[in-house]
Image: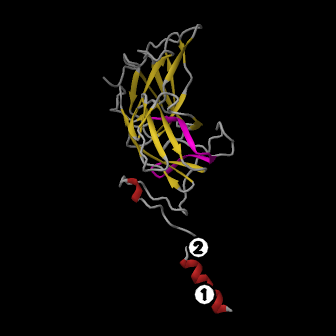
Amino acid sequence: MLLLCLAWLGLAASQGMGDSRTYDQSGYQGMGTPDYGTDQAVMVMPDYLSPYDSALPQGYQMGSAISSRLMMEPADPAGEGLLIEENKSQANQLYIQMGNQILTEGTAMLGEDYVLWARVSARGGLQLFDYDLLVFSQLSIAPGWYRIRGAYGEFLGGHLYRFQVAGLSSNDLRVLVSPGGYPTAFSLTGRVVDQSGQGLVGARVTLTNSDGGRFSTITNEGGYYALDVTAGLYTVNAQHPGYAFTPSQVQVMGGGVYAARLLVGSPFSGPSISGAGALPPVFS
């Protein structure tokens, strides 16, 4: 009996009991996507403000402590007049929207939102990765087209997105984040605008962190600002005569250029807070 048990255990092990295989990378055109084994832990940060079932994990952007709240919704790109660069060799497809086109690679602007599109070919759970980080997941999804909102150019560099549904992977979607009009000689940059999107010149921008650090500068003629700060989580606020602002937060990591979300000024009829006495801009 003992010999029979040992023989059975050996057969089970040879057939992959406790599967630890990794996904074959040959289908990704040599783009260097990391392997994801079935026994490999992935990090999911839940977003309790999900528009779907609150028990479903939603994603945060890579390296950020602030939720980008990726949201997926059924949508028809052709019905919205978008031109599709489709690759029939992949069952699932992932795209970025660039103007009136959806493309299999593209460029996003630093400090701006961008939109992803997914064509899903099978029913099952969806997982969206940015390199080796799980940034979004949906417990069950039907085949069809989906729009993914909430992606944000929070740092200067690049993303490599891919999703999986029912064991099938999409193409690799490379998204390069371009500086656009933002100054990038400092570790943190951002912009202050009015409700029409016009930059507010001379707005005082103040950053504070949990250690009591306080940093201040003023915006240039385009409403842009830049500061050199150490890694950490910062609260960002602005002051400008005639406007009120809602503070935002930004996570700065070491060795990169990060963009705070836009500070949008709402017209304010009460007493204005003057920007007099603000520090001079720290960039040209």
Whichever of labels 1 and 2 marks the residue nearer the N terminus, that label is: 1
Whole-Å distance between the Cαs marked 1 and 2? 14 Å
Is 14 within the magenta?
A: no
Q: Secondary structure at mark 1?
A: helix
In the figure, residue 254 lies in which quadrant? top left
Q: Which residue is found at the position 63% from the left and 92% from the top? A: 3
**Residue 92 falls left or right of residue 175:** right
Residue 247 x, y percent position in the rendering = 55, 26
Q: Residue at x 61, y 82 (%)?
A: 9
Measured as percent of width and height from the top left, residue 272 is found at 54, 9
Q: Which residues are magenta?
A: 130-153
| Residue marked by disc 1 | 7
Identified by mark 1, the residue type is: Ala
- Above or below, 140 against 77 in this view is below
Q: Residue at x 33, y 25 (%)?
A: 283
Looking at the picture, tell me which residue is in the foreground, 6 or 235.
Answer: 6
The answer to whether 110 is drawn above or below residue 175 in the figure is above
Q: Pointer 2: residues within 10 angstroms few (<14), some, or many (20+)?
A: few
> What residue does disc 2 label?
17
For the residue marked with disc 2, what is the amino acid?
Met
Can you say whether 118 is above or below 38 in the image?
A: above
